Amino acid sequence: MIGDTILIVEDEVPMRRFLCSALASHGFRVVEAATLAQAERAATYARPSAVLLDLGMPDGDGLDLLKVLRERSSAPVIVLSARDREDEKVLALDAGADDYLTKPFGTSELLARIRVALRHARGQTVTTDVVIDVGPIRIDQARHEVTVANQRVHLTPTEFRMLAFLARHAGKVLTHRQLLHEVWGPRNAHQTHYLRVHMAALRRKLETDPTRPRWLTTEAGVGYRLVDE
């Protein structure tokens, strides 16, 4: 049985073959595009469930296609790029990418990111539900209550807002800017020290070992992720 359709936007033939083989062997239907122009057409006729997007394309920057996709489609976009500078990752995520994988990467990690992205698209983790469960963490948004392994944990209002925002997008990297804008407002979009302080507090309260966090992970120089497994 053929599963979800994945659009691969990649100009390097060996990488495209690798991606096609890996995805097809796990039941995905694959559509290929070697240029941005091909990708834009494919996104229209194939209506993919998710898009794997390389940024360095021969006819332009993949970010241009990302902006088009965000205007026309709700399909999650995972950027696959050799660009590993933090500011470029932030730029892609702020532009609407759902995730960012730096080349080279393993098949298992890629498939895990795709599964999370597809759950987001189906509303299974990006949610407005009153109660959100992520691993051992339960967030009751109506009551402003948090439990870990059924044990009540006291959070400050700011800590609760930050955790709830991460939980509503569990599995997805949220950039510093996105978190600051949501929790503290647009005037504080550059106060990254706010995040460090409150993330440290959340880890002390929620993690078994705050120095080696299992659930609240850091994407260095980019932001934070509440792991969804």
Image (cartoon, rainbow, N blue to C red):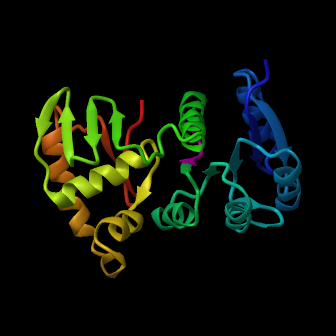
Q: Residue furthest front?
A: 142
**Relative to 45, 76 lies left or right:** left
Residue 214 vs 84, above or below: the answer is: above
**Relative to 32, 220 lies left or right:** left
Residue 12 vs 3, above or below: the answer is: below
How many numbered marks have been drawn onto this rendered protein structure?
0
The picture quadrant where one finds residue 49 is top right
**Relative to 37, 130 lies left or right:** left
Asked whether 41 falls inside the magenta stretch, the response is no
The picture quadrant where one finds residue 138 is top left
Question: 174 or 75, which lies in front?
Answer: 75
What stretch of residues is rendered in magenta?
101-105
Q: Residue furthest bottom?
A: 187
Residue 129 vs 161, above or below: the answer is: above
Residue at 48 percent of width and 67 percent of height: 87
Which secondary structure class fits the magenta region best? Answer: loop
Residue at 12 percent of width and 35 percent of height: 152
Asked whether 104 falls inside the magenta stretch, the response is yes
Question: 121 or 103, which lies in front?
Answer: 121
Q: Is residue 40 visible?
A: yes
Q: Position of residue 137 (x, y in %)?
A: 26, 34
Quadrant of the rendering where the C terminus is positioned: top left
Q: Position of residue 213 (x, y in %)?
A: 25, 38
Q: Is residue 211 visible?
A: no
Q: Position of residue 68 (x, y in %)?
A: 73, 66
Quadrant of the rendering where the N terminus is positioned: top right
Residue at 28 percent of width and 50 percent of height: 163
Residue 189 vs 158, above or below: the answer is: below
Q: Residue furthest top?
A: 1
Q: Position of residue 78 (x, y in %)?
A: 61, 48
